[in-house]
Image: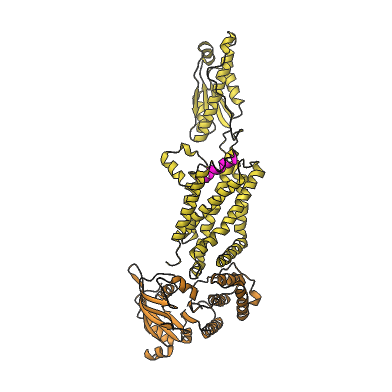
Amino acid sequence: MSNKAIICQDLTKQFGAFKAVDHISFEVEQGEIFGFLGANGAGKTTAMRMLCGLSFPTSGKATVAGFDVYHQQEKIKANIGYMSQKFSLYENLTVTENIEFYGGVYGLSRTEIKKRGGDMIDMLGLSQSAKKLVGELPLGWKQKLSFSVAIFHRPKIVFLDEPTGGVDPLTRRQFWDLIYSAAADGITVFVTTHYMDEAEYCNRISIMVDGRVEALDTPTQLKHSFQAQTMDEVFYQLARRAQRTAD
Amino acid sequence: MKRLGFILQKEFRQIFRDRTILAMMFMLPIIQMVILPLAANFEVKNINVAFVDHDHSTYSRRLMDKIASSGYFRIVGYEQGYREALYLVEKNEADVILEIPQGFERNLVREGSQQVNMTVDAINGTKSSIGGGYLTAVLGDFNSSLDVITRMPQNTADLKAPPIEVTWSDWFNPRKEYKYYMVPGILVLLLTMIGGFITALNIVKEKEIGTIEQINVTPIKKWQFILGKLIPFWIVGMIVFTVGLTVMYVVYGIFPKGSIAVLYLFGAVYLVALLGFGLLISTFSDTQLQAMFVAFFFMMIFTLMSGFFTSIDSMPPWARQISVLTPVTHFIAVVRLIVLKGSGLEHVRMELYYLIGFALLLNGLAIYNYRKTS
């Protein structure tokens, strides 16, 4: 039990007659990089929001970091980091001010924030821009900063919702370096993406189609069982079965 | 508590970084307080009168002179007939027609009474009723002076005072200046705007740009988030209140007759109530446009039914009940009482309870309705 970061059993979210997430079950090991794939509208974000305690499941069971998604959402929130699709640092605050605010919200002390924040800014190479408003940074920098802020309080699990959307290939590479170093520190990474090269970087991946998890394995095994050369092919084979139109 | 400190720090940084909002918060009150009382003035002057004099006598002449010299009327014409005078009303050049019939002087002297015909354009209700009233008063005055003239030759014993004599003095606003009534009301409206709109828009903006989701996924407690929004805008509101009071004194020379501490106590509670109202709206709205419309809808009702423009006592019973249910009503009443009459806490205690009730209710609903998990 304790060594599983996420356990999900028949988790379902229904909006009226529409099953956005339809009885999904999977487990994520601690320290794992877990890729959560699926076409637009397959239900990835909805599933992730339930796991983060932002939305109540309709039925099914799930625990995140050992806490129940129905009753212990606030405990889950203290133990996870979250980076949403929308950039959500405060654009009218500086880099340092954003770090200070989120650090404080997660209960870090001012001295800790100062020390760790300084290290983090150095590591990101943002020393020149520490006093700049976040709104003035280029997108790639924003995304890297956003990720670093999401793991600043050293959560057990970090949820990343399409973190590299619209980012250039070089920055994406750097971004994945950050993910790897977070995983090396023992943080479990739960990431959604549309880039199949990124899928290859994950330890294991699941692919959602129409609200269900249709495949779950390591990238190598998946390619093997779908008799495909690349992850792209695997994805096409599965996504083609979709009945829903993407939104 | 430590967490709240970080939240407050962030809110203050954002407030003071946004120069436009900052300017709006501090310049608007000054501009509004200076301009609005001059324009929003119910004092009726320049009532346009057209005369139709069929008598052409000394008395009719004297009556018209008396009206012209009263200071409230502007003579727009001496017409030959009623039809011509009515034409002036239709062209919106005259508000009142005074028709003096033939034999006006003769009947007055011989019989001691005579009717005149007064026609008032009632489209602008206030102007017509007040204008009509003024004219009636001038006529009454003319009557009594006539009394003296016609009775002069007779025995002076007849000149004794009438059985009941009415004299009056105007309290609390001896010069009957409208600004004393309006300025405190406008001050209240200012606080209402700050409280009702700015918090609502601020939170909904966080919803729009998506930062609220990031907040909702942190272990921030509901009360911490809400206090984090309330406190900064409460402080801003109190500063605006102070600026408003200063303008009231510097520009209009109105200094609160009652206790300033009591005034601030009410201001403080009122702001908490209105901020709660703004918070409540923000929990229902997803976009700033929605929040604006909803807030505006209620602000209109609050303002028009608050007794700011019209007397609550003359509203129909159902309207009076709505009026009692809006916090603005109570605060306007209290501010007028304290500033103009010098009422103390003991006179306005009930209003304080009302406002505390509103503050608890609105904020309670806002906290209840704010959801970190949907």
Q: Is residue B40 visible?
A: no
The quarter of the picture where the C terminus of chain B appears is bottom left
Viewer-nearest residue: B52 or A133: A133
Q: Which residues are magenta?
A: B329-340
Residue drawn at x 61%, y 44% is B259
Residue A95 as seen in the image, left or right of residue B217: right
| Chain drawn in orange | A
Residue A28 as seen in the image, left or right of residue A109: left
| Residue B332: % across, % down | 53, 44
Q: Main secondary structure of the magenta part?
A: helix
| Chain drawn in yellow | B
| Residue B76: % across, % down | 57, 29
Compared with B229, A61 (above or below) is below
Q: Residue furthest left?
A: A17
Q: How many marks?
A: 0
| Residue A12: % across, % down | 36, 74
Residue drawn at x 34%, y 67% is A16
Q: Is residue B332 magenta?
A: yes
Compared with B362, A144 (above or below) is below
Residue drawn at x 60%, y 75% is A112
Viewer-nearest residue: B100 or A30: A30
Compared with A106, B202 (above or below) is above
| Residue B26: % across, % down | 62, 53
Residue B327 as seen in the image, left or right of residue A126: left
The quarter of the picture where the N terminus of chain B appears is bottom right
Q: Is residue B81 visible?
A: yes
Q: Is residue B139 magenta?
A: no
Compared with B79, A91 (above or below) is below
Viewer-nearest residue: B13 or B46: B13
Q: Residue furthest right?
A: B250
